[in-house]
Amino acid sequence: MTVSTQLFVVLISLLLVLPVVEAVEAGDAIALLLGVVLSITGICACLGVYARKRNGQI
């Protein structure tokens, strides 16, 4: 599985689980999805910087 496929599966599973919980409003669901996406993006960015430093490109 590629990273984009895994991310797509995670997002779809979150979208399927969230409507079941009645306490979660639409705003909370959007905030959660944005947080997950931004966290994954940040982790990938940090890994990219680390890999470039390790290879001596920076």
Image: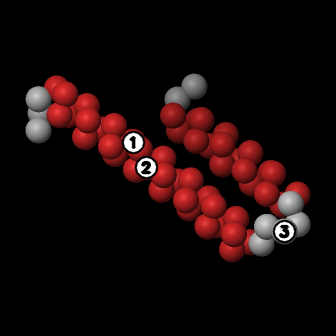
Q: Which of marks 1 and 3 is in front?
A: 3
Label 1 close to label 2 by CB (< 8 Å): yes
- Left or right of 41 on screen, residue 10: right
Say which quadrant the N terminus sits in. top right
Residue at the spot of label 3:
23
Q: Residues within 10 Å of mark 3 (few under 14, many from 20)?
A: few
Callout 2 amino acid = Thr
Q: What label does residue 44 carry, if any?
A: 1
Q: Is mark 1 on a helix, strand or loop?
A: helix
Label 1 close to label 3 by CB (< 8 Å): no
Q: What label does residue 41 carry, if any?
A: 2
Q: Which residue is drawn at 59% across and 35% down?
A: 6
Callout 3 amino acid = Ala
Label 3 close to label 2 by CB (< 8 Å): no
Q: Residue at x 33, y 43 (%)?
A: 46
Give the camera-side residue of 54 and 6.
54
Mark 1 vs 3, N-terminal side: 3
Q: Distance between the residues labelled 3 and 2?
A: 28 Å
Q: Residue at x 67, y 40 (%)?
A: 9
Callout 1 amino acid = Cys
Q: Quadrant of residue 31?
A: bottom right
Q: In which quarter of the image is residue 19?
A: bottom right
Q: Is mark 2 on a helix, strand or loop?
A: helix
